[in-house]
Image (cartoon, helix red, strand yellow):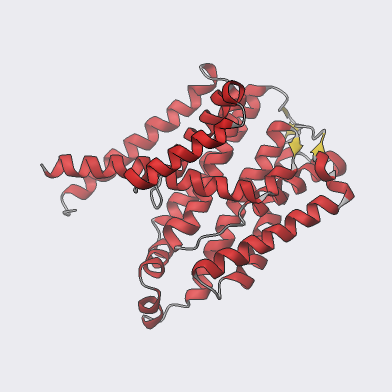
Amino acid sequence: MSTASQPTALIKTEVLYSGLFILGLIAPFAIYPTFLMKLFCFALFASAFNLLLGFAGLLSFGHAAFLGTAGYVCGLMVRDVGVTPEIGILAGTVCAGLLGWVFGILAIRRTGIYFAMITLALAQMVYFVVLQIKATGGEDGLQGVPRGHLFGLIDLSDNIAMYYLVYAVFSIGFFIIYRTIHSPFGQILKAIRENEPRAISLGYDVNKFKLMAFVISASLAGLAGATKTLIFQLASLSDVHWHTSGEVVLMTLLGGLGTILGPAVGSATIVTLQNELADKVGSWVTVIMGTIFVVCVLAFRRGIVGEIQALIQRAGIR
């Protein structure tokens, strides 16, 4: 891209994000708010995962551990300790970040399939712990989590009030991811992804940057999980199951790996399919999503957003 075209591209990007932000502000008056809140939680979860895989090149099969752990911590803090919702969300996010630090310390010294298998094994250990501890409710999950009052003032039992809290959480999380990607730190992550030996030769402590990326990704996944628990007033065992880790991989690849908006688009597609088809086709929705994924991988390897970007670039060249 030429220097002259960079300001134009920046303006277009700002206009796009501003339009999407405004659209999100008015969306609950046209679409069922609970559906939108679920969508935003998974969009943040997928975006956090994309930061790790799409920009650092690290494939984690254990990201559900961070989503679920934060959800359980938030639920226990709000229900049993009696803290306000924002403190519960913060506590869940911090715990997910600490768990991400532990996972990262153990996993980042390996690459490729070995890294993925280590994260999967650690996540399965978390699943077993959550299943066995009485406080988490075992197979029944953590039920009866009150939404409470935000800052002790705003009643979150009102779906519209809850929606705007979720939207604010998503917007903050998305902004953190955006700024991380477009910072010098993000550029180093891309360099590590593209050519790790070269990054090492340039003097970068590759393991340190990988660990930082892992902790940021885990924290933001936890932020999504803690918020999700407040929305549905439930932390379920499925939140820490490996199926959820696989689902976020599907969302990210379907939307567009290594793109900014791709994970959000992919999560919106999957959540919408699950919502619309679950009552009509039952368990066959899994087969339908699998078919869509196979078609996407074979025919649209860049994902939905990636293919759209490539199409726009080709049209611009012509």
- Name which residue lies at 85% across and 43% down: 137
Q: Position of residue 233 (x, y in %)?
A: 75, 33
Place residue 232 in its image quadrant: top right
- Name which residue lies at 36% across and 67% down: 194
Give the side of residue 35 with respect to residue 47, left or right. right
Q: Position of residue 6 (x, y in %)?
A: 22, 49
Q: Position of residue 82 (x, y in %)?
A: 84, 40
Q: Nearer the viewer, residue 117 or 255?
A: 117
Can residue 162 be seen here?
Answer: yes
- Name which residue lies at 63% across and 60% down: 120
- Name which residue lies at 83% across and 45% down: 138
On screen, residue 41 above or below 219: above
Q: Nearer the viewer, residue 282 or 75?
A: 282
On screen, residue 198 above or below 194: below
On screen, residue 264 above or below 176: above
Q: Nearer the viewer, residue 313 or 293?
A: 293
Can residue 300 be seen here?
Answer: no
Q: Nearer the viewer, residue 115 or 232?
A: 115
Give the side of residue 206 with respect to residue 282, left or right. left
Q: Position of residue 132 (x, y in %)?
A: 85, 53
Give the side of residue 312 with respect to residue 64, left or right. left
Place residue 190 in its image quadrant: bottom left
Question: Which image quarter holds the C terminus?
Answer: top left
